[in-house]
Amino acid sequence: MFKKHACYLSICLLVAPLVATADEVPVTVISPNPVQQALAQLPSVCPGLAPHIDPGAQLRLQAFYQQQGDVPLWSADERRQALQTQMQMLADDGLDPTHYSLPTADATANVLCSDIDISRQYLQALQDLHYGRLQQSRFEPLWHSQPPTRDPNTEVLAFAATGLQDMAQAFDQARPSADLYRSLRNAYATVRQQPLPHWDPVDNGPLLRPGMDDARVPELARRLVSGGYLAKAPSGKQYRDELVKAVKAFQLSHSLQADGVIGAGTVAELNISPAIRREQLRINLERFRWLSQDLEPEGVLVNVAAAQLSVYQSGIPVWQTRLQVGRAERQTPLLKSRITRLTLNPTWTIPPTIMREDKLPAIRLNPEYLRQQNLQVLDPEGRPLAPENIDWARPGNILLRQQAGPRNPLGKIVMRFPNPYSVYLHDTPSQPLFTKGPRAFSSGCVRVEQPMMLRDLLVTPAERARTDELLATGVTHEFRLATPVPVLLSYWTVEVDRQGGLVYAPDIYGRDVVLMKAMGSVL
């Protein structure tokens, strides 16, 4: 008891002014709130700590201490040790524990400043674990149709209050609960403690098809053995069935076309180093911390990198289908919105970029192109114009619209949601492209392999019956959903499948390296 009061008195002395006159015995004026006084005067009270605390962190610290009665919080060895243990476990979350180093015990140190420093690192660790260490808006911005309403400080302070009683529980509450995150964390925790495997790169060359002879076959076999796709390397230079089967398994687990044909795409994925693969797990944990803020129990989740759509019900993915997404020069944007309506038997008004870069050059080369593609020329008010009266070298402010029908690139149905990019989910007549991988073929919109199955999961039985009737007419109809459905377009390049295996997606937009550098990866 004496030790506790002596410590508190020493803190008061550090921050309280001394008031004395020549005729008086010096009197110590003790502030009723030394913690808040120190936080308000950090540059003078804790000059070494002040540069590390921005105004936002200062306000959060003030609220945290006020929440706890404005007393020092870290005098107990047991609490500090419990915090240190949880900080070390952040390595399994892909976060570097050295970023949250606690001050060492030092008899000459300012006790109150050390207490504030521990709280600073504690709150920062909880925030980074819950929301991500990096700001998503700086690296992979995601547009919201409705601004998020959560208050990060309120959530972090709630976790922090729990931790003063149960540190492990606080960190587990801050850690995203989504299975996407938890399963990948478990995988990374295992991989990061294992020695990195070694494999030699596979040389580039002509397409290698099953049954062919090729000098690269032995090195290909060794690579697949190193990666766990093949028990032992077969002899010879012929690309035989056993090796073809292993290649197909590799292609499937890397979101490639699993045909056993080895081209440039498969070679590129084979040659990604073990160190980079491990870092992929780490940076995608950061992406899942971002994603967890927008993921809802009910709705549609799109992974743009893998070109895959999942429908969630009660927090569980109940259905998946393949997609075609935007190619690198016309990327599908990341966004959070709500599917509000369906366009049945849609027409297609060609977006300005596609008209300028694709359609106008085709029309100039082939006067019959408009007729062949069933394209109508319209003025800005939607009135028809005669194509022969248009100067196609300088067409001015016109629209091109393709009528509904089997050749319409939007197919039979479009799922629409508010966004500033004019993108949507839609049917497509380009069905053979769904067997490819990666599937980055579109101009930004998302083509759905099984759009009618998706429709069924978005609507009530009565809405399904009504939309079937409208589809049968062949006439364009706009159908508004009684209950809008959340849709989230995100981007990640590895996840854990239901069998516990890692499934990679090609980094079609070249974003992984940027995140690796920002996270401070050492390769």
Image: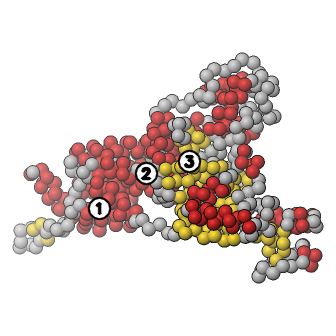
Measured Cα–Cα span from mark 1 to mark 2: 22 Å
Residue plotted at (62% across, 38% down): 253
Residue that mark 2 sits on: 176
* Label 3 sits on residue: 516
At numbered mark 1, what does the secondary structure look like: helix, strand or loop?
A: helix
Question: What whole-number distance in Å separates the C-alpha atoms at marks 3 and 1?
Answer: 32 Å
Q: In this view, does 503 lie to the left or right of 218?
A: left
Residue type for callout 1? Phe
**Tag on residue 196?**
none
Q: Name the residue under label 1.
A: 64
Using the image, determine if residue 376 lies above or below residue 77. Answer: below
User: Dot 1: few (<14), some (14–19), or many (≥20) neighbours within 10 Å?
Assistant: many
Picture coordinates of residue 225 (x, y %)? 62, 25
Label 2: state its secondary structure. Answer: loop
The mark closer to the camera, 1 or 2, is: 2
One can see residue 83 in this view: no
Q: How busy is the neighbourhood of tag 3: few (under 14 within 10 Å), some, or many (20 plus)?
A: some
User: Label 2: few (<14), some or many (≥20) within 10 Å?
Assistant: many
Question: Is 356 rendered above or below residue 179?
Answer: below
User: Between marks 2 and 3, how big is the CA–CA gap?
Assistant: 21 Å
Name the residue: 76% across, 37% down. 263
- From this viewpoint, which residue is outermost toward the top? 235
Q: Where is residue 42 in the image (x, y as percent from the top left)?
A: 31, 64
| Camera-nearest label, 2 or 3 | 2
Query: Hey, what amino acid is under mark 3?
Result: Met
x and y percentages locating residue 411 in the rendered image = 74, 60
Q: Which residue is drawn at 81% across and 60% down?
A: 407
Q: Residue at x 28, y 57 (%)?
A: 161
- Element marked by disc 3: helix
